[in-house]
Image: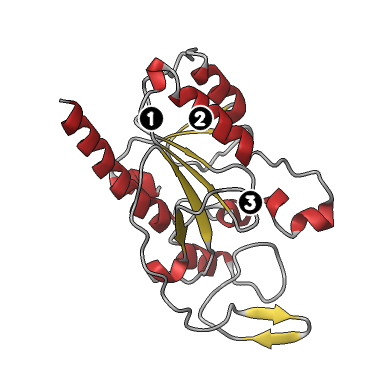
Amino acid sequence: MGYHRAGFDVVGVDIAPQPNYPFEFHQLDALAVLDRMAAGGTFDWLGPTLFAAVHLSPPCQGYTALKAVHGNEWPMLVDEVRKLMELWRSQPWGEGLPYVIENVQGSPVRRDLVLCGEMFGLGVIRHRYFELGGWLATQPGHVPHRGRVRGWRHGTYYSGPYLAVHGDGGGKGSVAEWQVAMGIDWTDDRHEIAESIPPAYTEHIGAQLIDHLRMTKAVAS
């Protein structure tokens, strides 16, 4: 949604169905799509030079404390998607293609940008890291947090200005509160909200990415 607000036409790919996704969507293995694009292949909806930029959000659970709880069932794909994107960019049809990889603390994502909900006045902290391939962006200053994340911790309830948008229980907010805190209004599915990036983050990135693409085009012409 943030990239759309920044001015991009958005096409989404995911291996799982996403019935509430608000843009063009194709249920496919994203790794297979990247591999095919790197090889110069096409789909009936996609040619290798169609995209102006690519955003990748590999599953994050394998890089978090959930790994200790669930063992190694979560895929850890950051290195693989980076390798495929760099292979795509090394081809004549992918030359100069900028990309973004997003993930959490503990992942091997390079911290070219670190964004926090407080930077955008949101009701979540939700630090996320962004690796920028083939371009640069300005890091906004980190804003001091105004207090704690609301909810129960080891039998003690804490009040605070932020919500924990993940899981169930623990004094977490309602769906409506999660929507407001994240800046999301296109779905009321709790799991989908919890898996989302606040659109303010990608709008911030997208605005700078469009400036990069326009500057690159101007230099080339």
What is the secondary structure assignment of the residue under circle 1?
Answer: loop
Asked if labels 3 and 2 touch by Cβ distance under 8 angstroms, the answer is no
Amino acid residing under circle 1 = Leu
Disc marking residue 107: 3
Q: Which residue is mark 1?
A: 97
Neighbour tally class for label 1: few under 14, some 14-19, many 20 plus, Cα within 10 Å: many
Tag 3 or tag 1, which sits nearer the N-term?
A: 1
Q: Secondary structure at mark 2?
A: helix
Q: Residue placed at 37% from the left, 59% from the top?
A: 139
At mark 3, the secondary structure is loop
Q: Residue at x 34, y 30 (%)?
A: 52
Q: Which of pointers 2 and 1 lies earlier in the amino acid sequence?
A: 2
Which amino acid is tagged 3? Ser
Task: Identify the residue shown where x is 47% and y is 59%.
Answer: 114
| Res 99 seen here | yes
Q: Specify whether residue 29 is in view.
A: no
| Cα distance between the residues tagged 2 and 1 | 9 Å
The residue under label 2 is 85
Residue type pointed to by label 2? Met
Marks 1/3: CA distance?
23 Å
Quarter where residue 23 is shown: top left
- Label 3: few (<14), some (14–19) or many (≥20) C-alpha neighbours in 10 Å: some
Task: Give coordinates of residue 135: x percent, y percent.
Answer: 36, 41
Question: Where residue 9 sits in the image (x, y, percent)?
Answer: 34, 35
Q: Indicate which disc, 2 or 3, sits on the residue closer to the N terminus.
A: 2
- Observer-nearest of 147 and 176: 147
